[in-house]
Amino acid sequence: MNRRQKLLILTILITLIIVCTYLAGICISEEAIAVDFTNAKLKPSLHHLFGTDWLGRDLFARTMKGLSISITVGVVASAISAIIAVLIGIASAASSKVIDSIINWVIDLVMGVPHLILIILISFACGRGLKGLLIGIAVTHWTSLARLIRAEVLGLRTEHYIAVSRKLGKSNGFILIHHILPHMIPQFIVGLVLMFPHAILHEASVSFLGYGLSPEQPAIGIILSESMKYLSSGMWWLAFFPGLTLVSIVFLFDRLGDNLKSLIDPYSAQE
Amino acid sequence: MKKHKKYLSRITLLVLLLLLVTGCSKSSNSPTKGNEIDNNSVVIAISTEPTTLDPCISWGHGTTPLIQSTLVEYNQDMIFSNDLATDYSISDDGLTWTFTIRNDVTFTDGEPLTASDVAFTFNTAKKGQSSLDLTFMDKAEATSDDTIVFTLNRPTSTFLNTIATTGIVPEHTYNENYGTAPIGSGPYTFVQWNKGEQLMLKANKDYYGTVPSIENVTIVFMTEDAAFAATKAGQVDVALTSATLATADIAGYYLKTVTSLDNRGFTLPVTPDEGKITESGFPYGNNVTCNLEIRQALAYGIDREQIAKVALNGFADPAYSENDGMPWNNPEVIIATDKIYAKKLLTDNGWIDTDNDGIVDKDGLKAEFTCIYPAGDSFRQAVALAASAEAKELGINIIVEGTSWDDISKRMFSDAVLMGWGSSNPYTSYSLYHTDTMLKDDYYNPEGYSNQTVDSYLDVAMKSLTPEEAYENWKKAQWDGTTGTSMKGDCPWVWLVNMHHLYYVREGLDIGNQQLHAHGASMPLLQNLKDWSWEN
């Protein structure tokens, strides 16, 4: 088995784990995370893998549900963000100097404001909840990918085959769709997957700070922020396990992005 | 790149280790009291910091102003006694209240306290943005150095309660910065206030009453979990704690449980949703909770003892009204839990589970409503979730949702809210239930409750000249045998529990005879600060 095959298997494995986590979260019923005061404040055991909180809710079920919300937010927000990035990146590179500098100025502006503050503001303005968070994360994360795509397109524009195509009388639209966009696919996919961890962590932080999802939703940020109140009374498992799983999922997404990059990036795909 | 990463991870590890080491070591310059007890001082950790120390704005209202003194005060049984006042009389029409005051009292700057200071205090409080409702007072006038006459525009039997919590400020030094460095004539003098951190007070050696036995008082403001940690480290003498934390034993401390009328319950909109809006433009009414049988089924079917015992670790008592335990409470408001009666109420009125989903319905309407509470309040969350679980047994689905106060102020007219009240002033009952107060933005009567009979009792109670007469009518407003504000009557509220106020107190410290606490666990604790003492 060569390195490429190993990488491929690893990538599939990671994807499977993420998909399973997501499905597990979806399949867990509301009953599993219901309040049960008779089983409150239990330490981790075989019956309650991650223990229970002060309301007797099973933390494992809550964490899994939280992860699936995180994954949803991560995927949807990143996808929107990546699409924005491609559109803006190409528009910037393919249009006049004036539009290009305006777009660059906007990118600088969005990059200049700390993401977290911008997300809080947008999420608050959109009435909080899932919708506000998705919009907030989507409109703040496209900048670096847009820069990358702009640079790529600028590079491609001077290629000989583009020049040939133009001489043959092909329209700008034809060149864009047939010659430029296909080259963007690797950047798009890798950029998209590498955006997931950012989006997930931002979702968790904004919810942690109380500007995101409502406290009834079992989001990881909510679980962590609630756990803070009980750390001093020795309920360490409230923060430990959900925190650990969040980090693991983020790490997995990061690896997935890196692996995909090695597999489909033309510079390394031939190794 | 790889090499770079390796370095980075090593540095991170190093930093983490350093943090771990420094985090574990005890900082040496912190004011740790250790085990040596200073008989002259006390450190108190509470969670709510006052916004000002000015009684003309909000300081001391509902409790006691500590730094300033009041005309009258009340004891544990709500019996009034004179403090600054030596005597008072009320005219037959209830509109003129005349007080005579002591002439031997001085402010801590040496100036004497006269009737004009008293008049100044009340007139200033009336003019300004005060949390005192003085709309019933026309003016306060000093007719001599020791006589003051209050003229009211309508008889107000609760005026004495208002007077008992209004500290007198010195007219000669009062300005807009008074609230940050006040001068008064109370048992304590102001020393220093670091906003967001601590308030320091010192016993007033020249106090005209009994000089407090503890000389130095430091009140630190911290969240309950921070206070818990500080108590474990032995840094505070008294710490406010919560029902979820108080199950832990801390060596060297005992848990002081104070019963309160700090109640929690559901406000349930009593009108149907007809698309109407309040004066401020928020929709009001709820098609499920507008049915009396739904409200009463909840009132009778929810097991309050169970909620107190299981969800709140036993740190609460069942609540049946806004003023349980007060002299103006009608003992008949108490109802026994009766799930069978509750279910019968529902079936008798046509609420039957036709689609077998566990929730009863009537004419296609499910017995389901949303209850909102301020997110982050773990006590209200536990009460709401426990009550919701109890309601489900009856076939009523309460969807519990935590949100911000900002959001609650918009939705409280159309959704149930897990609210809390409880005060040592019967005027609260008027605010909660009178038609004049319905659907206002002040959180008192968001359910839109209005009942002519109740209004007349409340009006008579306000006009009464003696407390006894007033108490009689406050009680009738709750339940007169046929109607009233209680759960037997119109049931606009389903009261659930009176929370216990919980404090870790260092062994050897006596925090006196705490009276029944009002809403808010921080300030009522300090009401009897002057009676606290260390055992030798």
Image (spheres, helix red, strand yellow):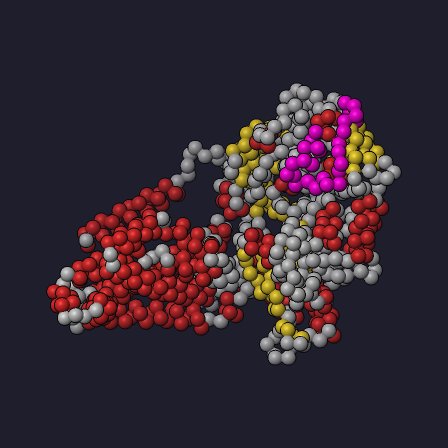
Image: B380 above or below B399? above
Which corner quadrant of the image does residue A269 belong to? bottom left
> Left or right: B83 with respect to B371?
right
Residue B443: x %, y % from top left: 65, 52
Front residue of A181/B80: it is A181
* Residue ranking furthest to the front: A169
Residue occupying image coordinates x 55% and y 51% = B245
Residue occupying image coordinates x 19% and y 53% = B1
Which corner quadrant of the image does residue B346 belong to? bottom right
Residue B167: x %, y % from top left: 68, 33
- Residue B132 painted magenta: yes
* Residue ranking furthest to the top: B110
Which corner quadrant of the image does residue B361 belong to? bottom right
- Would residue B205 be seen by someone viewing this image from the given angle? no
Residue B423: x %, y % from top left: 70, 46
Image: B315 above or below B89? below
Front residue of A56/B110: it is B110
Instruction: State how many labels appear.
Output: 0
Residue occupying image coordinates x 57% and y 31% = B180
Residue B23: x %, y % from top left: 39, 43
- Residue B56 painted magenta: no
Image: B282 above or below A15? above
> Left or right: B419 with respect to B32?
right
Write the start and end of the magenta stretch as one range: B120-147
Quarter of the figure that contains the C terminus of chain B: top right
Residue occupying image coordinates x 83% and y 60% = B481
- Would residue B522 be seen by someone viewing this image from the given angle? yes
